[in-house]
Image: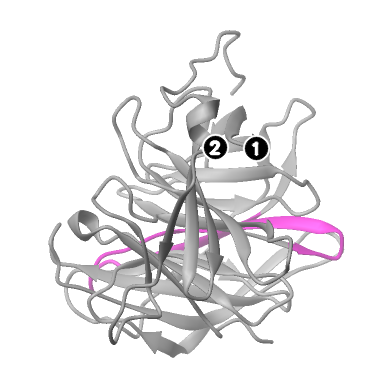
């Protein structure tokens, strides 16, 4: 759908958006996790790679927050190094989304991103410095009854682009539904989705009745689908989560998308006491940057070597 002529600008000014908060990794057995959010409004619901730091030792990423009220923070920039981090809020220029759950950079379009809400509205963004401007927005195709989305990934192969997203599912009675479709853009910027395919997916871990089988997705350069899953017992936990090798995706030279999910997904790592809602394979690396939305306990990030070929 086209944007209205008048845009609403978020309460955060561009000057405030450039304010940077620096921190170091927490001490103790979980020292690999870096706390980047302090409460339920600042957890990490999705991560998109933005670029390397000038010295090449760290990465800049954009993270979305699943806030729902007018004026609450929707987007931040995190600069991550092993052992330290920086955070700066990003001002939102345009119609405010409700419950952002995922974000992904658009291949071949520097500074442009697609962000997804839990109910399936895709926002195309242009990020310049401390401001994210809404270019356009549209609903996902083929939304199923009761679908609740927490994941979105883009894959570029053979000169074509495809999108993957998933209804998260809940427990043994509702597997996740992984959707895939070719993706193009209208001249005015609207995302356009082609024919949609669907696959059911059950996470190998966690296995309790509250398991969200897919809480985020990322795709490696070779087409491996890396999926996180999470269990949430309430705003104060306890939480549990895992990252698994879920299968593969290919995009043909004609744009046809094929998804082959693993019959028995391989668990790459388990993370008791954390609720992983963001997974981003970092280009040129085997590392995945993981992010958590631990509700009242805040949010954390860390890297793990999950994205090799």
Q: Nearer the viewer, mark 2 or mark 1?
A: 2
Residue lying at the far top in this picture: please name it.
5
Any magenta on residue 178? Answer: yes
Residue 284 in the image, given as x and y percentages of width and height? 74, 75
Residue 304 in the image, given as x and y percentages of width and height? 51, 82
Instruction: Please tell me the numbered disc located at residue 202.
Output: none
Question: Could you tell me what secondary structure mostly forms the magenta stretch?
Answer: strand
Give above or below for 112 relative to 171: above
Label 1 secondary element:
loop
Quadrant location, the C terminus: bottom right
- Residue 140 visible in the snapshot: yes
Question: Residues under labels 2 and 1: Cα distance?
Answer: 8 Å
Instruction: Please tell me the numbered disc located at residue 129.
Output: 1
Label 2 secondary element:
loop
Circles 2, 1 touching at the beta carbon (< 8 Å): yes
Any magenta on residue 131? Answer: no
Residue 159 lies left or right of residue 39; in this view the side is right
Name the residue at 73% across, 74% down.
221
Name the residue at 24% across, 51% down.
39
Name the residue at 59% across, 18% down.
3
- Residue 199 visible in the snapshot: no
The answer to which of 158 and 283 lies nearer the viewer is 283
Give the magenta-colored segment's residue range.
Answer: 156-181
Q: How is the image coloured?
A: one colour
Quadrant location, the N terminus: top right
Residue holding disc 2:
18
Residue 176 lies left or right of residue 222; in this view the side is left
Residue 217 in the image, given as x and y percentages of width and height? 51, 66
Q: Residue 131 appears in which quarter of the rendering? A: top right
Mark 2 nearby-residue class (10 Å; few <14, some 14–19, many ≥20): some
Name the residue at 62% across, 64% down.
59
Give above or below for 183 relative to 7: below
């Amino acid at each position: 759908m086209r944007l209205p002529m008048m845009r609403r600008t978020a309460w955060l000014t561009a000057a405030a958006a450039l304010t940077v908060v620096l921190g170091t990794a927490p001490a103790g057995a979980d020292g690999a996790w870096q706390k980047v959010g302090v409460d339920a409004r600042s957890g990490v619901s999705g991560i998109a790679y933005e670029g390397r730091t000038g010295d090449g030792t760290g990465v800049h990423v954009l993270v979305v927050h699943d806030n729902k009220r007018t004026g609450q923070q929707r987007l931040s920039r995190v600069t991550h190094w092993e052992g330290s981090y920086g955070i700066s809020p990003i001002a939102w220029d345009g119609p405010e989304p409700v419950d952002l759950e995922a974000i992904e950079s658009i291949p071949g379009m520097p500074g442009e991103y697609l962000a997804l809400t839990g109910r399936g509205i895709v926002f195309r963004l242009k990020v310049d410095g401390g401001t994210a401007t809404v270019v356009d927005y549209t609903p996902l195709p083929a939304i199923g009854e009761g679908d609740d989305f927490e994941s979105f990934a883009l894959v570029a192969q053979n000169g074509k682009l495809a999108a993957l997203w998933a209804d998260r599912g809940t427990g043994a009675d509702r597997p996740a539904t992984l959707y895939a479709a070719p993706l193009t853009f209208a001249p005015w910027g609207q995302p356009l989705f082609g024919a949609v395919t669907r696959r059911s997916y059950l996470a190998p871990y966690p296995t309790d009745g509250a398991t969200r089988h897919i809480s985020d997705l990322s795709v490696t350069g070779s087409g491996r689908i890396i999926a996180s899953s999470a269990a949430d017992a309430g705003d104060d936990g306890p939480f549990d989560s895992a990252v698994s090798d879920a299968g593969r995706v290919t995009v043909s030279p004609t744009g046809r998308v094929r998804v082959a999910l693993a019959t028995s997904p391989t668990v790459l790592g388990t993370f008791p006491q954390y609720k992983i809602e963001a997974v981003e394979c970092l280009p040129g690396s085997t590392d995945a940057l993981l992010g958590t939305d631990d509700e009242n306990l805040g949010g954390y990030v860390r890297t793990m070597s999950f994205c090799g070929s």
